[in-house]
Image (tube, rainbow, N blue to C red):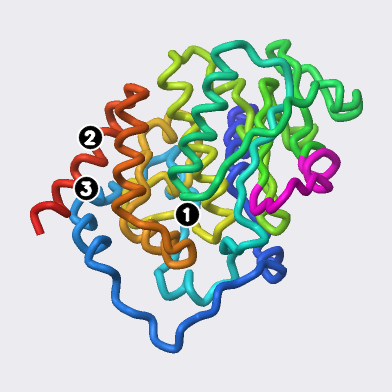
Amino acid sequence: MKKLLLLVFAILLSCQSDKKEKTNLKTQSVPEQILPPQPYFVDIKVNDVKLGKPVFGDWLFSHKENGQSFEQFMRTKHVVPTKEENIIYLQPIGKFNSMQIKQIELVRQYLQIFFQLETKVLENVSNDIIPNHARRIGDVGQEQFLAGYILTDVLKEENPNKRIALMAITEKDLYPKPEWNYVFGLASYRDKIAVSSMYRMQKEADFNLGLERLLKICSHEIGHMFGLHHCIEASCVMNGTNSMIETDSHSIRLCSLCQRKLNSGFKYDNLKRLKELEEFFQKNNLNEGVALMKKDFEKIKNK
């Protein structure tokens, strides 16, 4: 039981952030009067799927979160794109096989559509960048990297041109502390950097399932960088998660409320984004995503 708890706690860390960090973030100006939602968000709200009552093992069973209204989001400091900072970067670390290389490129394409911001993949970095003191052998013989070292000693000083967010992707397993077994990822929202591991997403998974997991986790963590809190309103990619099983059960779609928050600072064309997402899901045989986007299109057409 003690070992199980450590595993659960390790998973939780990937979505934790230090509230004190947010005081250093840039903020968009808050209008004196917050306008009602655009018709687009009202129309697609009917497709939001309400979350069921949490059960033991679910994120919301052990985390009593209050959620984040649109008004709270607008009045909280958060990062928004500017002319000086508007590119998302991915930093691969490790020796990736052909399947993983393809998935990283697809993650790049997806994030560019999801956030409607240019997204680039930096040149691959060797695992040799991780020193011995930030490595260990895991409980089943796998090599693991210390996630915090990657944030503070690899990513923090990296500042590619016009960077607004930087996420490392490793093929090695990660751990957050010596006493914990593993973690899917770790982020510093103040520094707008994060790291995620492909190791457990790919294990015992086919290509599409592994890809879908990557898309969910990367868009979730970068969503946090832009001020989105965990969503408790509907099944949403911004839901908190305790396990890969729970991640698989959550929607890849941003709910209408989280879409409204994101769009408030980015000012992208909602219909263009929706069309591009549907095309991406269709092209890559991600049937759940296709169905979700089609449902949103239907609600818009019927108005």
Q: Where residue 277 sits in the image (x, y, percent)?
A: 35, 39
Q: Nearer the viewer, residue 301 or 233?
A: 301
On the image, which quarter does residue 203 sit in?
top right
| Range covered by the magenta-colored residues | 151-165
The three-letter code of the residue at mark 1 reads His
On the image, which quarter does residue 260 sit in?
bottom left
Task: Report crowding for label 2: few under 14, some 14 to 19, many 20 or more residues within 10 A (C-alpha).
Answer: some
Give the mark, 2 or 1, whose residue is nearer the N terminus: 1
x 29%, y 71%: residue: 37
x 68%, y 51%: residue: 163
Marks 1, 3: nearer the viewer:
3
* Residue tagged 2: 291
Tag 3–tag 2 contact (CB < 8 Å): no
* Residue tagged 1: 230
Q: Nearer the viewer, residue 138 or 88?
A: 88
User: How far, Cα to Cα, is label 3 from label 2?
Assistant: 9 Å
Task: Say whether residue 67 is visible.
Answer: no
In the rendered image, the quadrant that contains the N terminus is top right
Q: Where residue 168 sits in the image (x, y, percent)?
A: 68, 35
Relative vertical location of residue 246 with respect to residue 222 in this rendering, above or below: above
The three-letter code of the residue at mark 2 reads Ala
x 83%, y 24%: residue: 135
On the image, which quarter does residue 18 sit in?
bottom right
* Residue tagged 3: 296
Relative vertical location of residue 227 with respect to residue 298 in this rendering, above or below: below
| Residue 274 placement, left or right of 264 | left
Task: Report crowding for label 1: few under 14, some 14 to 19, many 20 or more residues within 10 A (C-alpha).
Answer: many
